[in-house]
Image (cartoon, grey):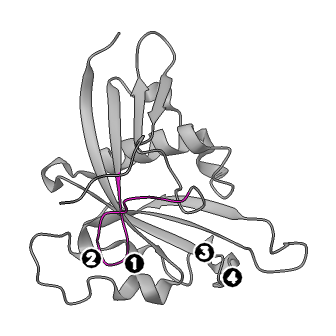
Amino acid sequence: MEDIKKQYTIQWVGPFHSLEEARKHRKGAKDELFATPDCFTFYYFRGNKRGRGHKLSKFYSYFGIHKSLDGYHKRLNYSHEHYREFHENENMDIWIGALGDLDQYSPGVVEEIETIFIAMYGNFLTENERKQKKRVESLKDTVCIINLWYDIEEKPLVSKRDSIKPFHDVIVCERDGKYPRYLVANRLSPWKGK
């Protein structure tokens, strides 16, 4: 058993159904209790692809990062190499994520989290083939990632349908021995609000 040396919380907001809808999120917000749009460095989208041979019943997905604190929208836009191949229709889901503790932010941390997500969900992330080469073996410490889920109004999602839930609530990449081991968990019961 290895000590958990690093723990990160990602606050996911979504699902948005278009880039325009995602861009409007927190636009002009001055509320310091929540992350500003510039704090969101992770994004995930899932939907249908354009073009012949792509059925509306088949879904494709992509996990991406933006290493600067100047907004994911600088990277995820209509000319994004993968997003431009997708239909913005009723099947499009976009989630944006921010580190829960910005004191932990660094480009290296963002890349470390991306490495774990791609190693863990590689078969599910159909558009991340190039990034599949990233190897979690390069990580030296055991890492725990806690995913918290919020709707587009930033209210906690109490009961998430599996159809909108892209990732597990807790991911542990354990470095006990030569190869990593993944442990995942989901909430067993809905949160009780007061």
Query: What SS does tag 4 mark?
Result: loop
For the N terminus, which image quadrant?
A: top left
* Amino acid residing under circle 3: Tyr
Answer whether labels 2 and 1 touch (C-beta < 8 Å).
Answer: yes
Dominant secondary structure of the residues highlighted in magenta in the image: loop
What residue does disc 1 label? Answer: 73
What residue does disc 3 label? Answer: 83
* Amino acid residing under circle 4: His
Which residues, given as a range, are shown in magenta?
Answer: 148-161
Query: What SS does tag 3 mark?
Result: helix
For marks 3 and 4, give the CA distance. 8 Å
Query: What SS does tag 1 mark?
Result: helix
For the C terminus, which image quadrant?
A: bottom left
Mark 1 vs mark 4: give the one in front: 4
Answer whether labels 4 and 2 touch (C-beta < 8 Å).
Answer: no
- x, y percentage for residue 84? 64, 80
Query: What SS does tag 2 mark?
Result: helix
For marks 3 and 2, give the CA distance. 19 Å
